[in-house]
Amino acid sequence: MGEARDGVKVKRVVFITVGTTCFDALVKVADSQEVKDELYRRGYTDLLIQMGRGSYLPTKSTGDDGSLAVDYFTFSSSIADHLRSASLVISHAGSGSIFETLQLGKPLIVVVNEDLMDNHQSELAEELAERKHLYCARPLTLHQTIASMDLNSLVPYSPGDATPVAKLINRFLGFPEES
Amino acid sequence: MEKNTSCFFSNSSPNLVITCFVAFITIILVRFLYVIYRTGKPLNKRTPQQTLSTLIVLGSGGHTAEMINLLLVLQKDRFTPRFYIAAATDNMSLQKARVFENSLADSGVKGISSEFMQIYRSREVGQSYVTSVWTTVLATAHALWLMIKIRPQVVLCNGPGTCIPLCVIAFIFKVVGIRWSSIFYVESIARVKRLSLSGLLLYKLQIADQFFVQWPQLQRKYPRAHYVGCLM
């Protein structure tokens, strides 16, 4: 905020992550002018892409000319740090990335990889989208989702709890209930 | 005379073999039906001091994270020693399990005993079916070898395909009386509408003693499953 008062723009980073997968369709669409313009219009200043095993290289940009700054990398051991400093996360549909982002309380758009053979992953994204924890998009509809999303309408995700399973397992094995 | 005795022997020994064979098959069948009958029935009461050796099957793609969330709330002093198994091509999962076990040691949980093992997979993604016959034989033999070494009393798994041979072997151990074990299967959180192939097999074949799902839709479809809410 202090920076903003001095006339320097506040950084609002969009972080795109594909995990350990190869998801060129997402990287490509994120690199399209359509999506970049839409993100800039929504007030984001930086786009950081974790591109995983993909081969499509986005065009880097410093963002000096009044547009979105774009940068990318393949893998990093500090994905959590990138998620934490992001204002918006766009992720592949892997459950690891989804729950890590939701538990940090970050707004999330999940993009489903339509090229995967056994596409059970869309089930989870669609279910969580129905419960308003995130937005679910396809590569071709990403720019529409960005244009129409209302981040205030998202419902915070409360972390799950494994104690019901543990209780049932203990009961089955004949262990006494813990008081 | 000689002719008679030889006749007698040649007649009786096949009979004996057949009788033994039939008896053996009958015993195995009865034992098999008993195991089927006992599967899913809770065990007798035990004291909290008793320990159970526990096999934990890990897998990439979110499986390991969910499993560790479950282990966090399980009583570590009851479920010990712990044996972790992950696919040989999966480098991350055992690493995460080691970090988890080390954090237990640091937080002062006493009597920690854990082992980490890798298992061959019967078929890698994209492998041809011709070579996968040989790799399946190899993977099954390896799974059997590991299970003979571990002989777990509790098996915890949540989805990766590597759990199928291990659970089937645990079931066979029950039938032949090597080790009685309880098999718990938690379907992955990523499965909202349909079970995974591993889950479907363990549910339909009734190998799992208790079967947990994380979404209510799945419980409606598979009524023997327990709905337990999300683990993540």
Image: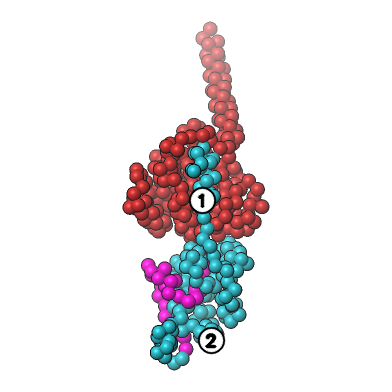
Q: Residues within 10 Å of mark 1 (few under 14, many from 20)?
A: some
Looking at the rendering, the stretch of residues picked out in magenta corresponds to A67-95
Instruction: Say which residue label 1 marks.
Output: A163
Secondary structure, mark 1, is helix
Please provide percent x and percent y for residue B192.
Answer: 60, 59
The disc label shown at residue B93, or none: none
Residue kind at label 1, given as amino acid type: Thr
Left or right position of A37 against A51: right
* Chosen colour scheme: by chain
N-terminal of the pair, mark 1 or mark 2, is 2
Residue A178 appears in view: yes
Q: Residue at x 47, y 54 (%)?
A: B69
Please provide percent x and percent y for residue B19.
Answer: 57, 22
Which mark is nearer the camera, 1 or 2?
A: 1
Chain painted red: B
Q: Colour of chain A?
A: cyan
Q: Residue at x 50, y 71 (%)?
A: A106
Placement of B181 over or under A126, stated as above or below: above
State which chain disc 2 sits on: A
State which chain disc 1 sits on: A
Placement of A144 over or under B47, stated as above or below: below
Give how far apart the Cα atoms at labels 1 and 2 are. Answer: 44 Å
Residue B161 appears in view: no
Residue kind at label 2, given as amino acid type: Arg
Placement of B203 over or under A103, stated as above or below: above
Instruction: Say which residue label 2 marks.
Output: A41
Q: Residue at x 43, y 83 (%)?
A: A1
Please provide percent x and percent y for residue B231.
Answer: 52, 56
